[in-house]
Amino acid sequence: MNTMRRIGAISLASLAIAFPLSACSGEPDVVGVWIAPNGASAFVNQDGSCAGMYYNNNQPLDIGGRMTCAFSGSTLVVSQPPNQATYNVSFSGDSMTLTAGGTDVTFTRG
């Protein structure tokens, strides 16, 4: 019986590692490669690093340095110090739209 408990614990641990956190929480998965409206490639990594996700006046802005993305519920916070933007996020099929202060940017999954 003790052996069966160990096997069960190992199986549960394996499942936890196999599924991304977003799938477990029921939130849409923002991790991956996205194509911006201008055709440029953008991405969000599992560790929160990202690129091509910061927009200013409907234009991509990248001042160099580390960019991070934090997604929760329907909000994406993109930071590249000293810049930071908070976007409302909506999903439709393979598209993700970021909305904030007159900025609407729709990415498609790459």
Image (cartoon, rainbow, N blue to C red):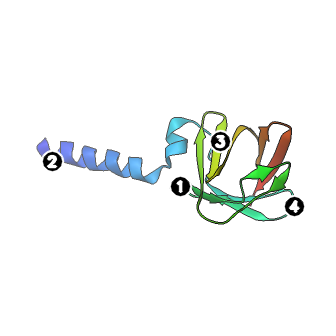
Give the mark, 3 or 4, whose residue is nearer the N terminus. 4
Q: Residue at x 76, y 58 (%)?
A: 61
Q: Which label number is shown at residue 3?
A: 2
Figure disc tally: 4
Q: In the displayed structure, does residue 71 sit left or right of residue 6?
A: right
Pointers 1 and 2 in contact (CB under 8 A)? Answer: no
Check disc 1 and give the amino acid type.
Gln
Give the mark, 2 or 3, whose residue is nearer the N terminus. 2
Eye-nearest disc, 1 or 2: 1
Check disc 3 and give the amino acid type.
Leu
Give the mark, 1 or 2, whose residue is nearer the N terminus. 2
Q: Distance between the residues labelled 4 and 1?
A: 24 Å
The single residue placed furthest to the front in the displayed view is 82
Q: Which label number is shown at residue 76?
A: 3
Q: In this view, does 104 lie above or below 52?
A: above
Q: Distance between the residues labelled 3 and 4?
A: 20 Å
SS class, disc 2: helix
Give the mark, 3 or 1, whose residue is nearer the N terminus. 1
Eye-nearest disc, 3 or 1: 3
Q: Nearer the viewer, residue 67 or 24?
A: 67
Pointers 2 and 3 in contact (CB under 8 A)? Answer: no
Q: In the displayed structure, does residue 9 sit left or right of residue 106?
A: left
SS class, disc 4: loop
Percent x, y of residue 62? 72, 61
Read off the residue under disc 1: 46
Percent x, y of residue 4? 19, 44
Give the mark, 4 or 2, whose residue is nearer the N terminus. 2
Q: Which label number is shown at residue 38?
A: 4
Eye-nearest disc, 2 or 3: 3
Check disc 4 and give the amino acid type.
Asn
The single residue placed furthest to the left in the displayed view is 2
Eye-nearest disc, 4 or 1: 4
